[in-house]
Image (tube, rainbow, N blue to C red):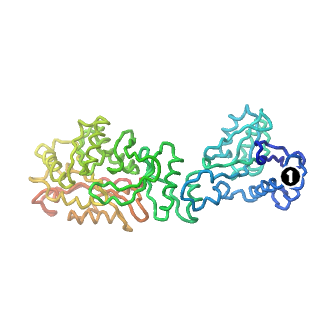
Amino acid sequence: MNTFFRILWRPFGFSRRLLKVESCRITESESLIPLAWASLIQKLSRTPGIFLLDQRKRFSTMPEIETNQRDSELFSPPSDVRGMTQLDRTAFKKTVTIPVLKVRKEIVNKLMRSLKRAALQRPGIKRVIEDPEDEESRLIMLDPYKVFTDDSFEKGELSILKQLNVNPQISKYNLELTYENFKSEEILKAVLPEGQDVTSGFSRVGHIAHLNLRDHQLPYKHLIGQVMIDKNPGITSAVNKINNIDNTYRNFQMEVLSGEENMMTKVRENNYTYEFDFSKVYWNPRLSTEHSRITELLKPGDVLFDVFAGVGPFAIPVAKKNCTVFANDLNPESHKWLLHNCKLNKVDQKVKVFNLDGKDFLQGPVREELMQQLGPLSKERKHSVHIVMNLPAKAIEFLSAFKSLLDGQPCGSELFPIVHCYSFSKDANPAKDVQQRAGTVLGISLEACSSVHLVRNVAPNKEMLCISFRIPAAILYKNQTLNGDNHEDPPIKRQRTDKDF
């Protein structure tokens, strides 16, 4: 097959223009055999206006495009950026040779709908540009991984080309790439030591990108932070967590890697708005699906006790369902923003907010309310009671607060509160591990009367789970035994165990 060849020529100091090489036609065999290029260069050296030395450089990459179309280095940044710790955007300039298709300008829009697969898609790159030779034509940039000869078009694409009277002949175009045209993972892969993990993901909290960098990434932390800001619209600050969440108030120390130091942020989750100081409270956007899952379990009129409420991601959506909510958090900042967000979402009349230790909350306000809920008139009650304990590192320890919590005689077990307790596990069988640890604290076996939901993978070999169970009368009431005259507790309906990413 004969291929009509075009090249982009841009000598030093001259403007860009597209030159037509009239004097030669390249056969398919020549295009695939590097030795044939020596003959081609000799022909081009006699073509007016072309410098031989620079032309050699430009043509040297062309056979690679056709003989090794899948070259993963084509859209990689220049190799000399390896080891860069302070971002130099100018160092990312690179010229690559890509295929283009010449078409009449009036059919471009119609044709592009049919060439979505084949068209080049790179950040900041226009897929259609003017033809420097012909103002009535346009050049469509094609993906060199998908289109490398005239025969690379799929049957449907060839059909539309024929229908629109477009010659499927491929030409070549020298495209200059800059920092703006590379993706964040491409930049970081080129900069960090070869073979090491690259950070391209983060948790987005309003305008803040929250990263968890590993030790080998720390020398590049400021560069990584700036790349995250550059490549993600709306992100104006990048922070790195520098200690674990192990203090009393569930927040963590963080370092601003790049951008503004403003930690006051606003987020939207499941159509609700939350405002808070991210440096002083706990917020995890990866729990959005879990917040929705628990919310969907409650019906209008139900009661929710949120023991570790944070800034309200469980409490506020549940209150919007016309449920009664008792929300607590020990952190004064979380308590402050919980009150603020209840007003912001117009549920402040439905949420009673507390600033207590979790155990004090359970043995105080929760106990008082349960005594009323499960009192003499409880048989007339038709709503359910749920207790959410989202403190994965320690929540299981707080289950001991339910032991002998209530006085009097138990009512029907179907009215007893349902607990949703979160925990981490590194065990090979995480569900069984959580059941056994919760059961040990309560002094009973939960394997037959609980369900475990896998929330998300936190780290390699570390899972976050939620165990749900109805508290047995033998645990909840004083002077009750597991073998005593108490009602048998029905098992909780088993829930899905698919991952929440």
As drawn, the residue found furthest toward the bottom would be: 428
Secondary element at image label 1: loop
Type of amino acid at the residue the image marks with label 1: Ile
Residue 386 seen in the current view: no
As drawn, the residue found furthest toward the front would be: 13
- Give the x, y percent position of residue 334: 28, 47
Q: In this view, does 47 lie to the left or right of 281?
A: right
Location of residue 250 (image quadrant): bottom left
Q: Is residue 92 left or right of residue 86?
A: right
- Give the x, y percent position of residue 56: 81, 56
Q: In this view, does 168 lie to the left or right of 202?
A: right
Location of residue 453 (image quadrant): bottom left
As drawn, the residue found furthest toward the top would be: 106
Task: Please tell me how crowded label 1 is: few (under 14), some (14-19), or many (20+) other residues with Cα within 10 Å.
Answer: some
Using the image, determine if residue 142 lies above or below residue 36.
above
Name the residue beneath numbered marker 1. 26
* 498 or 254: nearer the viewer: 254
Location of residue 39 (image quadrant): bottom right
Residue 373 seen in the current view: yes
* 267 or 49: nearer the viewer: 49
- Give the x, y percent position of residue 482: 16, 63
Q: Image point 25% across, 64% down: which residue?
A: 439
- Give the x, y percent position of residue 228: 51, 50
How many marks overall? 1
Q: Image point 20% across, 51% down: which residue?
A: 356
Q: Image point 82% across, 47% down: which residue?
A: 5
